[in-house]
Image (cartoon, helix red, strand yellow):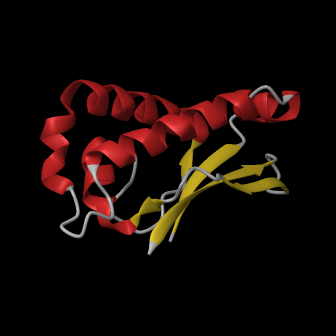
Amino acid sequence: MSYDLCLKIYTKSGNRLLYKVFDNGHITYNVSEMLVALGIKSKASHLNMSFNEWIPKLENALNELENNINEYKQYDSPNGWGTAENTFEILKKLWVEIQEDLEDCQLRKSVEDGDVFISWLI
């Protein structure tokens, strides 16, 4: 089983503008505890958080993995389907894709207006 990261964009009135699943290599469910420890996923199966609140958490997680990856190897899956290293690589790809998407003016405005929410899907 894997997680997909979904970006939901809503207007203030609740009308959906965009529902996008990032094609980032899929983070396996086996790294759930690591994602919780990194602060980018809640213990609940779904995370609905404002994009503006979540992006700094993603930046912190990337910095944490880059500087302290050995501390997160304790969360590596015994079957090899989900390691600190591949989680780091997938999150870096996700970061790049998000930055590219933010070049879209409508998305950037929605982010600035606080209308963007992020959610993990299983």
Q: Height in image: 58 above or below 15?
A: above
Of residues 101 and 108, the one nearer the viewer is 101
At x 14% / y 37%, what residue is drawn? 70
At x 29% / y 33%, what residue is drawn? 65
Is residue 39 something that shows in the picture? no
> At which x and y percent is residue 86?
37, 47
Of residues 73 and 102, the one nearer the viewer is 73
Is residue 93 something that shows in the picture? yes
Left or right, 25 with respect to 99, comes to left
| Furthest residue in direction front, as rendered | 80
> At which x and y percent is residue 40?
39, 45
Q: Height in image: 104 above or below 23?
A: above
Quadrant of the snapshot with the N terminus: bottom left
> At which x and y percent is residue 2?
46, 68
Asked which quadrant contains residue 119, the reply is: bottom right
At x 42% / y 69%, what residue is drawn? 45
